[in-house]
Amino acid sequence: MDFRDHIRVIADFPKEGISYKDVTTLLKNGEIYRLAIDALVEQIKPWQPDIIVGPEARGFLFGAPVAYALGIGFVPVRKPGKLPAKTISETYALEYGFDSLEVHADAIHPGERVVIVDDLLATGGTMLATANLMKKIGADVLGMGFLIELGFLKGRDKLIEYPVFSLVEY
């Protein structure tokens, strides 16, 4: 299955020179969405994770159904101020400035085996921050899975410590 056929590409969005990969066209097609989730599950299942972790927000759209299919839990990683209980945070550098991610301090126990799932691997900054956050909480990061990878941005180069796969590469 070439999932590229179901991902809309929008030129010059959100600004000129950017080629936006719109997954909403894949998500609205139930059969194709199911096949994408099944393909992610097939790659992740041999790692035998305890928990799937998904960063806000599109990581929820792929990570949660993967966790469901595997019969394991899902833990969301959020932007600051969106989780109600005690959190652990990780701050990371952006091109111009900084951002942070948070997870509930009791969401994952030391030694639990996690896989991080998101829709897209671009520069790798958010994924590295998510992995660092998992390490802070004591999790064992087994790897990362993505629907799409923008290979030309070399996000994998920041993630060499982890196995990484994607279903589609641009």
Image: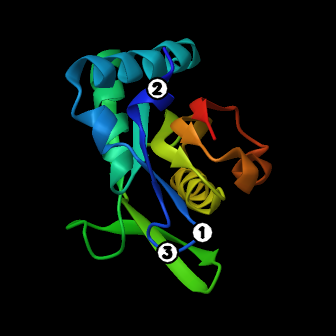
Dot 1 lies on which element?
Answer: loop
Q: Is residue 126 above or below residue 145?
A: below
Q: Is residue 116 left or right of residue 97?
A: left
Q: Which residue corresponds to mark 2?
A: 3
Amino acid bearing label 2:
Phe
User: Callout 3 environment at 10 Å: few (<14), some (14 to 19), or many (20+)?
Assistant: few
Which residue shows up at 66% across the image and 59% down it? 123
Which residue shows up at 44% across the image and 18% down it? 41
Q: Which residue corresponds to mark 1?
A: 17
Q: Is residue 73 above or below residue 129?
A: above
**Residue 108 visible here:** no
Distance between mark 2 and mark 1 Cα atoms: 23 Å
Which residue shows up at 57% across the image and 58% down it? 136
What quarter of the picture does the C terminus occupy? top right
Amino acid bearing label 3:
Lys
| Label ID, residue 15 | 3
